[in-house]
Structure formats: C-alpha cells, structure tokens
Amino acid sequence: MKKEKLLLFFMTAFCFNMAASFVHPVTPTLIVERSLDSSMFGVALAAMMTMNFLFSPFWGRLCAYVPTKRIMLICCVGYAAGQLLFGSAYTEAAVVGGRMFAGIFTGGVFTAMSNYVINLSGSDTGLRGRRLVVLTTIQNVGSACGYFVGGMLGLLSVWTAFIVQVICLVSSGIGYMLFCKDDTGNKPKPQKRLSVKDVNPFAAFLGARNFMTPLLAMVFMIVAISAIGQNSYEQCFNYYIKDQYGMSSAYNGMFKAGIACLTLALNSTVSMYLQKNTDINKTFLYILAVCTALICSVLIFRGQIVFIAVYIIYSSVMVLRLPLLQAMSAAQSTPETSNAVMGFYQSMNSLGGIFGALFAGLIYSRNPMYPFILAFIAFLVSTLIGIAYRKMYAGNRK
C-alpha cells in the first residue's frame, strides 16, 4: 500500500511540475506583446524567488505540524491564484505583484514534496537517496515536458497557457490530497505547539542555527551560488533565442523535450550509479566541474548550433547535482530537523535564483552575453567551494 501511495505521489508530482512550466516559454512573448520593459523577464522571477526564499523555511517547519499532503494542496491553490494574477497583468507592477504572491506558495510545494519522500523513507539513507533521485528526475523531466506543452499552447495564445496551467495546478493539489498518505506517523512529534512566532517566516529562517554545521553551511553555499548560475543561464537563454534568433515559444518547447529525454537517461544511469556506488560527498564535485566547463564553452564558441547544443547538454547534466546536494543535506540532518533542513535547502536554492534572475535581467540590456559570463563565474565559485568542502569532509572522516 505504501509503494502504491508513493507511485501515485510521483505521478501527481510529474503533473504538477509539467504545469509549473507551462508559462515559462510564453513569458518573453507576454513581455513583448504587452510592451513591458525587457528586464522584466528577470525581475519578475526574482520577485517570485524572493518570496520563495522568505517562506520556504516556514513551510519546512510547518511540515512537522501539519500533514504534508495538506500543505501541498494549500500551496498548489495559492500558486495557481498567483499565476492567474500574473497572466492578467498589463503593467510591470502587476507582473511583480502576481509573481510575488505565487512565490509565497511555490517553495511550499517543493519543500513539502522533498519532506514527503524523506518521511516515507524512514532511516534508510540509501533508499532515501534513491527516492530523492526519482523525485528530482520527475521534477526536471516534468518541467521539460511542461516547457514543450507550454510552447505549443503559446502558439494559440499567451492566455491559453495560463488558463491551462491554473487548472492543472489546482488539479495537482487535489491529487496530492487524495492520493498521498498522511505522513504524521512517519515523523517525530514536535515537542512544543506551533506558536504565532513560528508563523513568522523570518523566525523560521533564523531557526537554522539549531541544525547548522560547517559542512552543511558549505553545502548550502554551493546550492545558492550554483542556483545563481543556473537561473542566469536559464532565464537568458529563453529570452536570448527570441530576441537574437527570433525563435518562437515552440522552439523552446522542442529544446526542452530533448532535455527531458537526456535528463531521464542520465538520472536513471549516472545519478543512480553515483548514489549506490560512490561517496556522493566527493563525486558531486565532478558534476559541478562539468557544468562549469560546458558554460565556458558557450563563451568561447559563439555559433548558433553550438549555443543550443551546449544548452541542452548542460541542462541535463546540471540536473544531476540537485539530488546529490539534497541527499548530502538530508544525510547531515536528524529525524527531528530533516523537515527544517529541506525547507532551508529550498530557501537557499531560491536565494540563488533571486540574484541569478535579477542580475540576468538587469545586465542583459548592456550585453546579451553578460548573463552567461555571470553563470560561468557562479559555477566556477561553486566548484571552488566544492573543493574546500571535499577537503573538510575528508578531514572529518579521519
């Protein structure tokens, strides 16, 4: 029964992640059609990521008190409402407002999904790691498929993509509530009742001092800084191919379909191999190094075909780092702190997304290649921190 519930959860997670990406390929079109400032493609995402950053620790803490499936329902509905506001916006202020409202809830869905998998995996770290790989694969393949579907919907109209997204997000929330197990019995009972102070997202964020260690702090630094590179590259690529090459949202969708296939292949082979047969606290560094090298090649070789091919390969390899860093974070937590750790992990991912998306949007107008340079620097710094982490980790094991 437990496996059946987990399978239904993964199927719902795939649908949610597809829906979450429906409007990404049409966002550049929305900006152009409604005569908004070109920087909005980065500023709007940064606004959403800011709220994601602030509220993810709160959702992580709330997971200890409330059935995780209930949080997923609430956040899916809130996310859908925010996207409805975004799709209805015709001014920069309205776009930012809609994205900020959605951002309050997006981090809650992703934090709750990770916690659900961890809670149902018990103390078996190997099983937990493999299930996190499955979840991350589903998230990224679903997102890539969502880009493809969204790109096709965008050919009809921008509004069509938004309406379909809202319907699917709400349906996913209902699916989580109906199909997921109540995980209350799978997590430690909190020692104190939830207070008004705990509802404060800033208080939840400050609560990180209760579980933070030097190694965990370095993992979170890698998560945040590599997220700067990921979001700078991702956001600018989407806008770049429309602005520089005149490609429609359908092309973006087709590229994502290719990424979905390659991501599925790499996660089902390379990622599973690393989880089962290697010490991921050491081998994660190779993934960061490969991402850094791929972005560097974009700066050296400027041809259109190379530019697109490298993006597809990079996007698939980059996904490999996510379950490794998640598993590294979870391994350094306790059953009492795992929910909070996953909330903080999502918050750090959002923190990097804030700066990556915002800087990408602001510096693109000066030179379209600047965001890609920023992405390279971010991954290079992450790799250097990874080297320091690996040395500290090896020293602690002696």
Image (tube, rainbow, N blue to C red):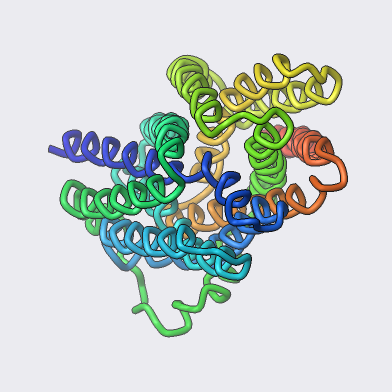
**Quadrant (top left, top right, bottom left, bottom right) of the C terminus:** top right
In the rendered view, does 71 fall on the left or right side of 357? Answer: left
Residue at image x 49%, y 61%?
86
Q: Is residue 347 above or below residue 4?
A: below
The residue at 82%/47% (across/down) is 365
Q: Residue at x 48, y 67 (%)?
A: 101
Residue 300 drawn at (x, y percent): 86, 20
Residue 125 visible = no
- Which of 287 and 143 lies nearest the eye of the viewer? 143
Q: Is residue 208 left or right of residue 6?
A: right
User: Residue 90: x percent and y percent?
Assistant: 55, 64
Q: x and y percent of residue 287 in the render?
A: 65, 25
Q: Is 315 in front, or is 340?
A: 315
Instruction: Tell me residue 284's x, y (percent).
Output: 63, 28
Q: Is residue 378 left or right of residue 285?
A: right
Toward the left, the furthest residue is: 1
Q: In the image, what residue occupies the spot 60% across and 45% down?
A: 28
Tell me the quarter of the image containing the N terminus.
top left
Tell me where residue 39 sits by quadrant. Answer: bottom right
Q: Is residue 72 above or below residue 368?
A: below
Whether residue 80 is visible, yes or no, is: yes
- Return the residue nearer the eye: 393 or 70: 70
How many labels sit on residues?
0
Q: Quadrant of residue 154?
A: top left
